[in-house]
Image (cartoon, rainbow, N blue to C red):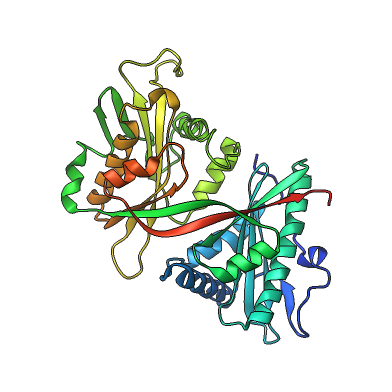
Amino acid sequence: MIPEESRFESDPEELVGDPPLPDGWEIGTPDATDRFEVARLTHLLRAHERHGRGWAGASVDDVLVEVSEHGLRTRENVVVRDPEGQIQAWGSVHDRAGGRMLYVHIVSRELAHPIARKCSEVLIEWARGQARAVGAARGLETQQIDTGAFEGDDRQYAWLISAGFRKVRTWWQMTRPVEPHEVELVPDPDEWEARGARFRLVDREGQGLPDEEDLRAVHDVLEAAFTDHFNSFEESYAEFLHRLREDPGHRWNHWWLAELVDDVPEELDAPAGRHPAVGALIGTVSHNATGPDSSYVSYIGVVDAARGRGVAKGLLRTVIADAARRGRVAVGLEVDADSSTHAHQLYESMGWRTKYVTESWHLDVGVTD
């Protein structure tokens, strides 16, 4: 459930009492109402991306997801300021699900190595403390810190390894171009049928929330589809909905369900008057400040009982057609390079290619250490 108050410690000095920083350097929290501080954090994040993959995509909205008051029920932040008050390092933690804490670790690329390393040490010590705080609040013995790195970022590698993190997974960040004629890939991206399956947007009246049964069906399908996948943690419906609505690219008209309407296996059931939901795709908008936007597949999942019936391919064809209808130039997605389902083979057969590579790094923190 979403807590009434954050499970994190809000005072960084409680977690990093005597930071190993030179005189005049300080730790604190960012001010989301200060446009200059938000702009500085955006600059740091974009520089981090540019170094790691050759180009920057983050925006002010991506920063505000982490630091704004709205997000602080499930997030907390720390910054390191130099003697002039300039933010030179930024850490953010996200209480993602029971046992899993996401961690953003960014240090200015303009700093000399010795002071950059000290900033990194401060951020990691703070993250360890937050892991103990959130783990204790959830009643856990061990709390995982899940952070990432771009492939080949040797500076980030060195800091994570020295802190005890281990690389656990590689992710291919894939994209495919979208052509205007691909709007005809499906009869209507809002709803269509093929091979006994119906693909449709979640039901919604006007500009309000979609039908709750549809939203719960999306959550249930994705929870079931990813149960045996790498690093899967059970996420409550409330946590799931809260997190996805925070995404700057969130749009309700980018959520699709796949239902079986013919030849339904006996093991599948559904509420009275409804067809069993067997697949789901959640898309978002990827904004481009200098050109046309793209679509992004945040999640796609199919339950075991419906695999082999073209459900995943149908959902992907739907999001491509929808992107073409909206004048988007591409559709992106992330795939586990070591997935047992070999999902990348489907994506490659449909035109996706790897644009860059990221990695997951984990550290397990004993809550009572």
Q: Residue at x 73, y 81 (%)?
A: 25
Image quarter where the N terminus lies is: top right
Q: Residue 332 placed where, x, y %?
A: 36, 53
Examine the rendering and report whether any part of residue 52 can be seen. Answer: yes
Q: Residue at x 61, y 82 (%)?
A: 111
Which image quarter: residue 29? bottom right
Q: Please, which residue is most extreme toward the bottom here?
A: 84
Q: Is residue 250 above or below residue 23?
A: above
Instruction: Between residue 91 and residue 9, name the one nearer to us.
Output: 91
Q: Is residue 223 above or below residue 61?
A: above
Question: Left or right of 327: which side holds 1?
Answer: right
Q: Is residue 46 above or below residue 200?
A: below
Q: Residue at x 25, y 24 (%)?
A: 195
Q: Residue 285 placed where, x, y %?
A: 38, 54
Q: How many marks?
A: 0
Which image quarter: residue 35? bottom right
Question: Left or right of 306: which side holds 126?
Answer: right
Q: Residue 64 placed where, x, y %?
A: 55, 63
Q: Residue at x 27, y 56 (%)?
A: 328
Q: Please, which residue is most extreme toward the top here?
A: 266
Q: Residue 129 placed where, x, y %?
A: 77, 58
Examine the rendering and report whether any part of residue 77 can be seen. Answer: no
Question: Left or right of 325: which side holds 123?
Answer: right
Instruction: Between residue 113 and residue 278, name the one nearer to us.
Output: 113
